[in-house]
Image (tube, rainbow, N blue to C red):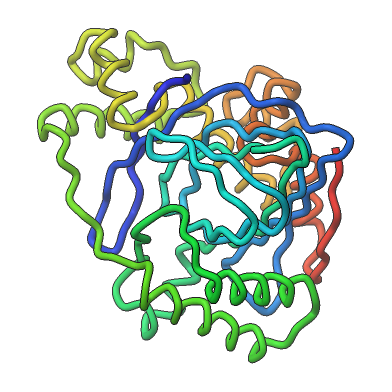
């Protein structure tokens, strides 16, 4: 199985806690391909296309809403304490903090197209989305019309399509989402006292992710025994404290890489023991290596660059 962990994410009504689980994936193989890019006319949006044979993602989460569609084969994914079999055409609607772990469901492999919507995307469209980020009802849905809209939008983002053309497809996607798949966030039912203690631990991890943090430190901050801390953290967050810390380091690394820092410097500046350690964990969570991620930020012009491992 793997360790559960709870994380804190931002929603339209404030902060909310969610759960995740971690485990070692299979490595990328020669038949696995992924590419990640940004379109110059669509700010605060990252786009990924992946086609995999045997590759298995580690259990992980995204800090922003992620929407997409399975466009080849059948994907399997852990999510919400269950394993889901997702055929071609399944729409993925992942809220911030939603722990999942895509992998192949058959020997024929699978592929998907994903769009990651950063906070600035919604802030620049307040008239469309109101006060905050929409939340999805379910992580996986069967909706042919929405799947077709998402595929059409994603394929246009591969090309140098004009802004109006893209905005039309965005409107179509979010019309479908708003009519069928968006809900108001619900309050977390975790015991208030323990939730507050886990929040303190998470705040500490966010503030000191660069340093070598021990379980004893976290237990002292939470005022819980080490065993109680580990059990409660996993129950509330969906990951162990260590797996959560690794995720924070990878998120920080992505930001530094986007600002032009070297891979060697990023590895040391984000708390990883060495470049090999950094590369291994970065690929486990993002599906690409730091060397594949870095070219995305090496040019200001649009370039959808194919990446292979």
Total residue callouts: 0
Pick whichever, 31 or 82, lies toward us: 82
Q: Is residue 256 shown left or right of residue 142? A: right
| Image quadrant where residue 13 sits | bottom left
Percent across and percent down for residue 250 are: 58, 36
Question: In the figure, 52 relative to 278: above or below?
Answer: below
Q: Residue at x 33, y 68 (%)?
A: 132
Furthest-bottom residue in this view: 164
Pick whichever, 211 or 96, lies toward us: 96
Q: Residue at x 52, y 77 (%)?
A: 173
Q: Residue at x 64, y 28 (%)?
A: 281
Pick whichever, 41 or 19, lies toward us: 19
Q: Is residue 62 shown left or right of residue 263? A: left
Pick whichever, 72 or 211, lies toward us: 72
Furthest-right residue in this view: 30
Percent across and percent down for residue 120 are: 48, 68
Residue 262 shows up from this direction: no
Percent across and percent down for residue 159 are: 80, 76
| Image quadrant where residue 296 sits | bottom right
Percent across and percent down for residue 155 are: 73, 72
Quarter that holds the C terminus: top right
Q: Residue at x 53, y 73 (%)?
A: 146
| Image quadrant where residue 56 sits | top right
Residue 3 shows up from this direction: yes
Question: In the figure, 267 relative to 94: above or below?
Answer: above
């Amino acid at each position: 199985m793997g360790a559960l962990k709870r994380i804190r994410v931002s929603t339209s009504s404030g902060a909310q806690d969610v759960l995740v689980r971690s485990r070692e994936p299979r490595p990328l193989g020669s038949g696995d391909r992924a590419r990640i890019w940004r379109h110059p006319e669509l700010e605060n949006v990252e786009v990924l296309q992946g086609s995999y044979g045997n590759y298995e993602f580690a259990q992980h989460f995204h800090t922003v809403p992620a929407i997409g569609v399975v466009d080849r084969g059948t994907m399997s994914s852990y999510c919400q304490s269950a394993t889901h079999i997702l055929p071609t055409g399944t729409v993925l609607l992942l809220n911030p903090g939603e722990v999942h772990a895509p992998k192949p469901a058959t020997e024929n492999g699978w592929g998907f197209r994903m769009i990651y919507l950063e906070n600035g995307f919604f802030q620049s469209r307040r008239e469309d989305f109101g006060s905050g980020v929409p939340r999805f009802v379910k992580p996986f849905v069967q909706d042919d019309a929405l799947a077709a809209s998402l595929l059409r939008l994603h394929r246009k983002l591969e090309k140098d399509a004009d802004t109006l053309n893209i905005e039309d497809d965005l409107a179509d996607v979010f019309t479908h989402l708003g009519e069928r798949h968006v809900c108001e966030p619900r309050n977390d039912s975790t015991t208030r006292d323990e939730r507050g203690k886990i929040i303190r631990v998470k705040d500490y991890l966010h503030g000191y992710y660069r340093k070598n943090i021990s379980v004893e430190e976290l237990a002292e901050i939470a005022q819980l025994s080490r065993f109680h801390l580990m059990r409660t953290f996993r129950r509330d967050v969906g990951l162990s404290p260590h797996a959560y810390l690794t995720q924070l380091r990878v998120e920080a690394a992505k930001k530094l890489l986007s600002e032009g820092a070297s891979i060697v410097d990023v590895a040391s500046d984000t708390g990883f023991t060495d470049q090999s350690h950094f590369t291994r964990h970065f690929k486990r969570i993002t599906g690409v290596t730091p060397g594949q991620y870095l070219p995305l930020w090496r040019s200001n012009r649009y370039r959808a660059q194919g990446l292979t491992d």
